[in-house]
């Protein structure tokens, strides 16, 4: 028999490897260390510009400011050049003179003015008339004036009064009559001339219209007429001023 010899190491040199052990538990946190010194500032290069921002929304309208003070008046401007003369206007109406003969008296109811200054002034007025008038007016205190501006009628009436002649004409839709004598062959004088507006015809014998427009100062019976009133019947006549004027 064969004997086998084996070398077994000693325990001093023998390593035995078991499975890994479990991790140990975390130990307690150690105390905070002192703050370190600040390091030097870095010198980095400038960065590139960023992109433009989008426009913001519009703000609310501002309130109206107070009115400013009034400025001082500027200096007066220089006079401009004189304009050229315009064309001549049409010829003007010839001026009327202020001369006019007139007769005017106050007549009182019930009074006769035959052979008084009323009658004398009437005859003097007629004798002083000419034939260069453009208007005649009869007026009184009891009526508006009655006027004729037809020069032909006006001057024919004036001429008839001056020469004690009968006359009958129309103007402005009214008749103007002067009766000096009437009857057969004009032998009956009518009060040194009776002026009658709106007479039906020359020397009409119905010469007491009511109302009427008659002036006859030299009537002996006191029927001196009236303008816009009774022209006869003394107790019905109204005291009034009557007049006539010619204008040139």
Image (cartoon, rainbow, N blue to C red):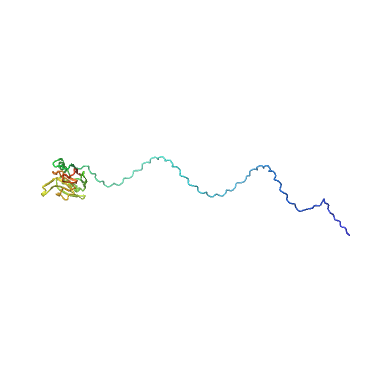
Q: Nearer the viewer, residue 34 or 170?
A: 34
Q: Is residue 163 left or right of residue 68?
A: left
- Percent across and percent down for residue 190 are 13, 46
- Considering depth in this image, is 246 or 228 the residue closer to the camera? 228
Percent coordinates x, y for residue 48 in the rendering = 59, 48
Residue 99 higher or lower than 8, as above or below: above
Residue closer to the observer: 48 or 33: 33
Q: Going by the picture, which residue comes out furthest to the right? A: 1
Quadrant the N terminus occupies: bottom right
- Most extreme residue toward the front is 235
Residue 199, position in %: x, y? 17, 49
Image check: 8 left or right of 93?
right
Task: Pinpoint residue 225: horizontal percent, then vertical percent.
Answer: 17, 45
Looking at the rendered image, the quarter that the C terminus falls into is top left
Number of marks present in the image shown:
0
In the displayed orientation, state which residue is furthest to the bottom. Answer: 1
């Amino acid at each position: 028999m064969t004997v086998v010899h084996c070398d077994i190491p000693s325990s001093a040199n023998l390593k035995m490897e078991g499975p890994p052990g479990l991790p140990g538990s975390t130990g307690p946190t150690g105390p905070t260390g002192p703050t370190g010194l600040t390091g030097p500032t870095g010198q980095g290069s400038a960065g590139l510009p960023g992109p433009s921002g989008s426009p913001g929304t519009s703000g609310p309208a501002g309130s109206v400011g107070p009115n400013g003070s009034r400025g001082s008046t500027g200096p007066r401007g220089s006079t401009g050049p004189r304009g050229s003369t315009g064309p001549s206007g049409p010829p003007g109406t010839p001026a009327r003179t202020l001369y006019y003969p007139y007769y005017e008296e106050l007549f009182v109811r019930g009074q006769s003015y035959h052979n008084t200054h009323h009658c004398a002034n009437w005859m003097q007025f007629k004798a002083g008339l000419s034939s260069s008038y453009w208007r005649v007016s009869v007026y009184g205190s009891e009526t508006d004036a009655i006027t004729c501006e037809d020069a032909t009628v006006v001057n024919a009436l004036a001429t008839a009064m001056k020469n004690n002649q009968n006359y009958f004409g129309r103007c402005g839709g009214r008749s103007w009559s002067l009766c000096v004598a009437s009857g057969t062959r004009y032998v009956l004088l009518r009060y040194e001339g009776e002026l009658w507006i709106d007479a039906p015809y020359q020397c009409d014998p119905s010469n007491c219209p009511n109302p009427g427009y008659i002036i006859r100062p030299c009537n002996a019976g006191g029927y001196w007429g009236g303008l816009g009133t009774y022209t006869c019947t003394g107790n019905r006549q109204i005291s009034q001023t009557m007049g006539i004027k010619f204008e040139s």
